[in-house]
Image (tube, rainbow, N blue to C red):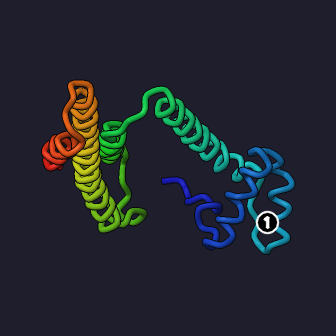
Amino acid sequence: MAPRSKVHTLPRELKEWLDAELVKRGFGDYVQLAADLKARGVEVSKSSLQRYGSPFERSLAKVKMASEQARALVDAAPDDEDKLGSAVVRVTQEKILNLLMDIDIDAEDVDINKLFKNAAEIGKASVAQKKFSLAVRKEIEEAARKKALEDAANQASETGRQHGLSAAGVDALRVAIMGQL
């Protein structure tokens, strides 16, 4: 088994700095990054940085593309019932399951409890998404019902006036219809 990359063994703060610098520098300038790390007390070769940076860049590009596509999709087709959110949760669950089945997990490198916790969180997100979808659907249906009753009351009031119904009669008709709210 190959030795673990020095980049992966960096302290959290330094790794976060490195990730931010890679993005800021457009995943280039590895010679200078290696020099900057050396000035911070860590010697990592430019090759190691490039081996770490390349998959990171690809992952970031995929996330950006997915975000842009999701934004375009939402703009093109508004999703009041959050069907898109439901689909995202399902696809995420499927991808994680496939990833877990496909990778060779080294028990020393993976915290199984965190994996199970993350799976549980995705399950909670799915339940929360369904509750949200039902609540939104109920609100939409209630708003549509209220609008239909208001339109019916307005139409009945106008028709009553046109046919000589008294103001009290028009008000009574309106109250009878709107009383359904």
> Can the viewer see residue 90?
no
Give SS at disc 1. Answer: helix
Observer-nearest residue: 20 or 125? 125
Residue 145 position within the rendered picture, expressed as x and y whole percent measured from the top left = 21, 40
Q: Residue at x 61, y 47 (%)?
A: 56
Find residue 127 and report its image quarter.
Answer: bottom left
Count of numbered labels shown in the rendering = 1
Q: Residue 81, image x and y in percent?
A: 30, 40
Relative depth, front residue between 106 and 32: 32
Q: Is residue 101 left or right of residue 25?
A: left
Residue at the spot 33% in from the left edge and 41% down from the top edge: 82
Establish if 150 lies above or below 113: above
Which residue shows up at 57% across the image and 35% down it? 68
Q: Residues within 10 Å of mark 1 (few under 14, many from 20)?
A: some
Does 133 sit left or right of 109 as displayed?
left
Residue at coordinates 71% horizontally, 52% vertically from top-left?
49
Label 1 sits on what residue type? Leu
Q: As rendered, which of 89 and 35 lies closer to the eye? A: 89
**Residue bearing mark 1:** 37
Residue 87: where, in percent of width, then height? Answer: 32, 37
Give the x, y percent position of residue 103: 37, 45
**Residue 108 visible (yes or no):** yes
